Image (cartoon, grey):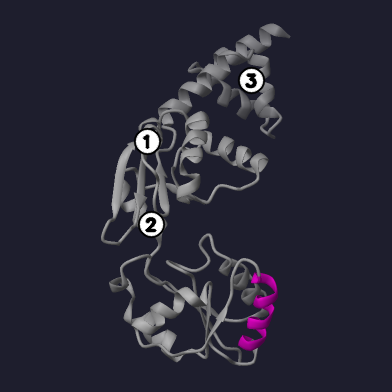
Amino acid sequence: MAGTLFLCATPIGNLGDMTPRVVETLQNVDVIAAEDTRNSIKLLNHFEIHTPMTSYHEYNKVEKAKQLIGQLLAGQNIALITDAGTPAISDPGEVLVQMCHESGVPVTSLPGPAACITALTLSGLSTRRFCFEGFLPADKKEKKQVLEELKTESRTMILYEAPHHLVRTLEELYETLGQRKITLCRELTKKFETVMPTTIQEALAFYQNEEPRGEYVLVVEGKSIEEKRKEEIASWEDMSIEEHMSYYENQGMDNKTAMKQVAKDRGVGKREIYQYLVGKE
């Protein structure tokens, strides 16, 4: 029988957040795959865990995953840990998980700390609907595309950022999203944990004079439904009724359904749209 891959969440700062279940699992698996063995050895030593480690990181994630799958298929149990937090979130662990499913290897997750969720709950922004973007792409063209997509996002957005890129990212967010509420979180669960509810513009002004330090989680307010609605109304006003109808029909709506939606968008009765179109024939 194949072994099991255990996704083990580790503390993002405070060692007191390590769960007894994760400690027990790390003590009993055959091997621990760690993002940085030099970093993880400190954690293992603290909890007196002596299980052998092997490195699994961004630069060997495909080839090493094949090796680990072989070990799992041979019956070994393997624990995957990242430098901090939950494996497979903005992490090469997602590749290993995918390959496990493709190979029929059981995978289970031992829940625990995750910087994105910790920051969200501290942000003071809406938690009912949210999306996680992680780090913005390094490629300029791809980053621009992602930012354009976020421009109309109504859910609360969560991003990660390194200190040396923070000011530029705040500039890009302000250029694309405009003035929004934002909460900047750093040193989460640590002694000098900082949670800063502000606006993008005010955060930018602050960090242009203050050197950013530590890894950041940015929680950004989504576009309000009211604001999106106003923009939609403005765009409909720039269209003729015929163009408005074509917009929906090109999406596959039949004439009757398109007419109903056009009337709704414009705040009029469906009969009014019908009479207008009939009069044009």
User: Dot 1: what SS?
Assistant: loop
Residue shown at the point (50%, 16%) measured from the top left: 268
Going from N to C along the chain, the mark reached first, 1 or 3, is 1
Going from N to C along the chain, the mark reached first, 2 or 1, is 2
Query: Measured from the top left, where is residue 98 in percent x and y?
Result: 63, 70
Instruction: Name the quadrant containing residue 103.
Output: bottom right
Disc 3 marks which amino acid? His
Q: Up-down: is 124 above or below 179?
A: below
Disc 1 marks which amino acid? Asn
- Which stretch is magenta? 60-72
Q: In the rendered picture of this protein, how many numbered marks are placed on residues? A: 3
Query: Measured from the top left, where is residue 108 in percent x and y?
Result: 49, 77
Residue placed most toward the observer, 234 or 97: 97
Residue placed most toward the observer, 97 or 261: 97
Q: Is residue 217 visible?
A: yes
Nearer to us of marks 2 and 1 is 1
User: Dot 3: what SS?
Assistant: helix
Q: Quadrant of the C terminus?
A: top right
The residue wearing badge 1 is 209
Query: Measured from the top left, where is residue 215 in percent x and y?
Result: 42, 54
Q: Up-down: is 208 above or below 268?
A: below
Q: Label 1, label 3: how many angstroms apart (C-alpha)?
A: 49 Å
Going from N to C along the chain, the mark reached first, 2 or 3, is 2
Mark 2, Cα crowd under 10 Å, few <14 / some 14-19 / many 20+, is: some
Residue placed most toward the observer, 171 or 76: 171
The residue wearing badge 2 is 117
Magenta part, dominant SS: helix
Tags 2 and 1 in contact by the CB under 8 Å rule? no
Residue shown at the point (32%, 52%) measured from the top left: 121
Q: Label 2, label 1: how many angstroms apart (C-alpha)?
A: 29 Å
Point out which mark residue 244 bears: 3
